[in-house]
Amino acid sequence: MRIWVDGSLRNAGDATVSVLDHGLTVGDGVFETLKSVEGKAFAITRHLDRLTRSARGLGLAEPDLDEVRRGCDAVLAANPLPLGRLRITYTGGPSPLGSDRGDARPTLIIALGEAAVRPDTTAVVTVPWTRNERGALTGLKTTSYGENVVALARAHAQGASEAIFGNTVGRLCEGTGSNIFVVLGGRLLTPPLASGCLAGITRELVAEWSGAQEADLPLEVLAEAGEIFLTSTLRDVQAVRLVDGRELPGAPGPVTSKAMRVFAERAGADQNP
């Protein structure tokens, strides 16, 4: 495995960063995960735009997107995979032990791992913890993922692949690494960004291509919705068949099936929509 670290490709065993890197010591970093198909990254322009927004929101210097693209191309060429998870990590770089940043330049790491095609349906559970829709990191894709690790472990312990969060006022928000859509009365709805959810790239494309609307929804809507599905870079569109043990008969339903079909067709026709 060849990994890009600060301007050059390195073998996995030599791809190291400082033990004082702020991304390691305090989680001061941002990242993007892209799907690669036969060596081509999907929706790279949208992902790099979001990387820049996240870096700006965290107060990091904006990444050199030409360098990021060069690194992505080099990693994809050096590690041929039919289906991959391309991870771009951009941190505050070597810094003092504490929350203050140092004067070093940010660290850029790009790595690729093998991915598997997800099943068409999955199970999810809600968790008792909340997303803070007014937090300093809200809407930023940062490396501070500790609460996602805890919530996802809870989901796995209950036989589910994803944990669903409400926000601090009890509204439906998102999963640990996915956005959520529901079908109510034939309408395809997804929580607004004001709920505290991440502006997912797949969420954005599904909304554009399938006509979904944003709606402020109570968490309890999961007990009423006739169809539910998740979106993410590696899930694409994935139907929910069980939510907190409640079965959704016939999943994927007609609205979800159409969203799955449209996404597959449009994404297959344009690798950088």
Image (cartoon, grey):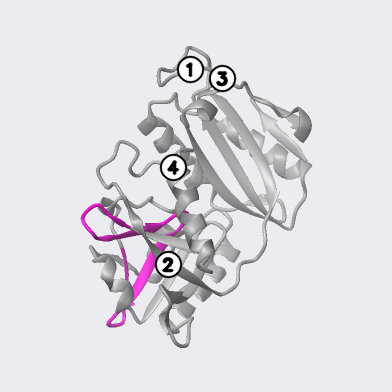
Instruction: Name the element at disc 3.
Output: loop
Q: Nearer the viewer, residue 56 or 140?
A: 140
Nearer-N-terminus badge (4/3): 3
Q: Position of residue 68 (x, y in %)?
A: 59, 34
Which residue was labeled with disc 4?
A: 141
Q: Position of residue 144 (x, y in %)?
A: 45, 38
State left or right for residue 53 relative to residue 6. Answer: left
Which residue was labeled with disc 2?
A: 125
**Can residue 249 be found in the magenta stretch?**
no
Q: Please tell me whether residue 90 is drawn above or below residue 175 in the rendered image.
A: above
Instruction: Name the element at disc 1.
Output: loop
Q: Identity of the amino acid at label 1?
A: Leu
Q: Identity of the amino acid at label 2?
A: Val
| Identity of the residue furthest to the front in this view | 157
Tag in front: 4 or 1: 1
Q: Which mark is residue 97?
A: 1
